[in-house]
Image (tube, rainbow, N blue to C red):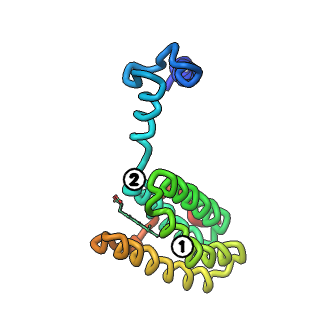
Amino acid sequence: MRRMQKAAIVAGGLLVFAGGAFAGSDWLTGSTEAQLKTLAEIQPGLGTVMIEYGNRYTNTYYAAKGGNWDLAAYQFKEALEIQEVGETTRPGRADALKAFEKAYLTKIEAAIVAKDAAAFEKAFMAGIKGCNGCHAGQGFAYIVYELPAAPPAPLSMKP
Ligand code: HEC
């Protein structure tokens, strides 16, 4: 996107929130309240969030396996951030996500911080059971995460 266009979009967005005097796009129309409702409706739900969550979980694994612990820490942090988006847009599933984090993710995080490959492997594999346990518990037993043979990220997994 050209810089000018980008600046216009940002400026338009600010003006919309400043009182709706100027709509910065031709699709975001109506009152300020109506525009906020439109924006809220297009925020990612759990299906979209989970695609990124699964990818980052997989990337975390391969980064740790490759010994790139900084990348593992980064991918893991980003997974937690997208999880928070899911907790916000799907509050009904927030408790289950937080329980999963407490039961499984804290151990994975500790292993990454310690750069402990054996502890990581154990915690990560236990985490997979947690992922799929939640899927089953939430009525999605047919959604089963399996560790892919390669990471989705086009990044070096080596330090
Ligand atoms: C709250 C419990 C919960 C936990 C914990 C959870 N998921 Fe999910 N996941 C869901 C739900 C619910 C869906 C179905 C999405 C929807 O609601 O539309 C889903 C869907 C998915 C999908 C399919 C996305 C798609 O549309 O293609 C993937 C991949 C996925 N999860 C991966 C994972 C991984 C990997 C983990 C663990 C690191 C995990 N999930 C942990 C609840 C959970």
Q: Is residue 15 left or right of residue 24?
A: right
Q: Residue at x 60, y 76 (%)?
A: 108
Of 31 and 61, which appears nearest the observer?
Answer: 31
Residue extending furthest top? 21
Q: Residue at x 40, y 40 (%)?
A: 42
Q: Is residue 142 left or right of residue 108?
A: left
Q: For the residue labelled by badge 1, is the local secondary structure a helix, a strand or a loop?
A: helix
Q: Is mark 2 within 8 Å of ligand 1?
A: yes
Residue 99 in the image, given as x and y percentages of width and height: 54, 73
Residue 111 in the image, given as x and y percentages of width and height: 66, 78
Q: For the residue labelled by badge 2, is the local secondary structure a helix, a strand or a loop?
A: helix
Q: Residues within 10 Å of mark 2 (few under 14, many from 20)?
A: few
Residue type pointed to by label 2: Thr
Quadrant where the image shows the C terminus: bottom right
Q: Is mark 1 within 8 Å of ligand 1?
A: yes
Report the number of discs: 2
Q: Could you tell which of marks 1 and 2 lies nearer the N-terminus?
A: 2
Residue type pointed to by label 1: Ala
Mark seen at residue 99: 1
Task: Measure how far apart labels 1 and 2 are at the Cα level.
Answer: 20 Å
Residue 43 in the image, given as x and y percentages of width and height: 44, 43
Mark seen at residue 137: none
Q: Residue at x 40, y 78 (%)?
A: 133
Q: Residue at x 57, y 68 (%)?
A: 63
Does the residue at mark 1 contact the one at mark 2 (Cβ under 8 Å)?
Answer: no
Q: Which residue is mark 2?
A: 48
Residue extending furthest right? 114
Q: Is residue 55 left or right of residue 17?
A: left
The image quadrant that residue 102 belongs to is: bottom right
Q: Quadrant of ligand 1?
A: bottom left
Residue 101 in the image, given as x and y percentages of width and height: 56, 71
